[in-house]
Image (tube, grey):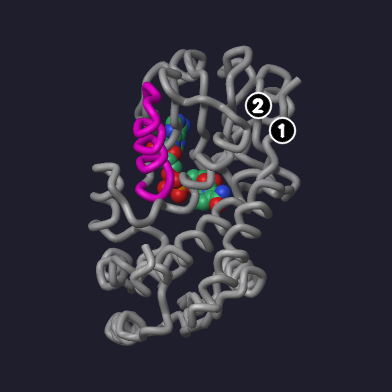
Amino acid sequence: MATIISGKEVSAKVKEEVRAECDRLRQQGVTPGLAVIIVGDDPASRVYVNNKKKACAEVGFVSEEYALPAETPQEELLALVNTLNRRQDIHGILCQLPLPKHLDETAVIHAIDPKKDVDAFHPSNVGKIMIGDYDFLPCTPAGVMELIHAAGIEVSGKSCVVIGRSNIVGKPMAMLLLHENGTVTICHSKTRNLKEICLGADILVAAVGRPKFVKGDMVKEGAVVLDVGINRDENGKLCGDVDYAEVEPKASYITPVPGGVGPMTIAMLMKNTLSAAKMAAGLL
Ligand code: NAD
């Protein structure tokens, strides 16, 4: 039976630390401020944005929401980003993705001041992560690392397999494991022998976006399994990329969905916004 790594508990701890630090910062006259831009009415994006605003209130940040209509022109969105870039009371800016089809996501990511890029999607921040000398870590992979640390799992020398190579999760995830001296393999939709590669993993991270994709026969006895996926199963119930019922008996540690990586992403966003505010105040 696996030990469950609770993202609910670890994220509460992270947010508590951020809240305490925010109190200290406020005594020095700085209140961290996060601006969240949402374009259109994607229901999943709306839930994420609401959760981010709620977390800001919990830790004592100011948050501002910019809800723009789906048909907002590119120039208008970029003008908003530029205004927020110049605001001294706004330390973090994030634009909830995906954007409506007519908008250029890359241009928007590039427009955000890298010092306010609390999602760490700007190429300058991505490059810094590659080098290992960074201001911000991308929230979801950083959240996975926090769970690994909280469980006391040593990465150094371990065989780590990441399924998925997106810019947001898979690639930076692999980099963070590499920084901790894991021997990392990245698998993707064109990978041959996926099952064999996964069976060699001491630490397996699933970021595929397919419900219950990782089956019991793909996991080594005693492996640590971290499930990034947020999907709906055939009954419309929330589930991960890992077939929990099959994998849990084989794993030594596992993250559940919900209550695993999901809450960590927002907690790490709070941590990044705090860092941005401290950097702006010359305190970091
Ligand atoms: P994505 O669609 O951008 O990338 C999916 C990756 O999976 C791709 O690199 C693709 O090559 C790979 N893949 C697809 N089919 C495969 C197959 N048959 N075999 C091997 N690899 C395959 O998705 P993403 O943005 O990286 O997100 C992945 C999952 O994580 C989704 O379920 C998403 O909802 C979830 N997610 C969760 C959080 C969180 O906070 N927990 C944050 C971001 C994403």
* Residue 174 is covered by the magenta coloring: yes
Give left or right: position of 208 versus 115. Answer: right
Which residue matches tag 1?
4
Residue 213 image offset from top left, x and y in percent? 57, 32
User: SS at mark 1?
Assistant: strand
User: Which quadrant holds the N terminus?
Assistant: top right
User: SS at mark 2?
Assistant: strand
Between marks 2 and 1, how big is the CA–CA gap?
6 Å
Give left or right: position of 205 versus 120. Answer: right
The answer to which of marks 2 and 1 sits earlier in the sequence is 1
Give left or right: position of 110 versus 18. Answer: left
State the residue in front, 124 or 217: 124
**Residue at image point 58% right, 14% down:** 220
Residue interval drawn in magenta: 167-184
Residue 50 image offset from top left, x and y in percent? 62, 72
Up-down: is 174 above or below 264?
A: above
**Residue at image point 56% right, 27% down:** 153
**Residue at image point 56% right, 70% down:** 24
Task: Tell me the crowding category of disc 2: few under 14, some 14 to 19, or many 20 or more residues within 10 angstroms, Cα based.
Answer: many
Up-down: is 18 above or below 68?
A: above
Q: How many marks?
A: 2
What amino acid is found at the position of numbered circle 1 in the picture? Ile
Q: State if disc 1 and disc 2 touch (CB < 8 Å).
A: yes
Work out whether residue 47 can be spotted.
no
Which residue matches tag 2?
253
State the residue in front, 216 or 157: 157
Q: Is mark 1 within 8 Å of ligand 1?
A: no
* Residue 196 is covered by the magenta coloring: no
What amino acid is found at the position of numbered circle 2 in the picture? Tyr
Residue 77 image offset from top left, x and y in percent? 34, 82
> For residue 46, what is the image quadrant?
bottom right
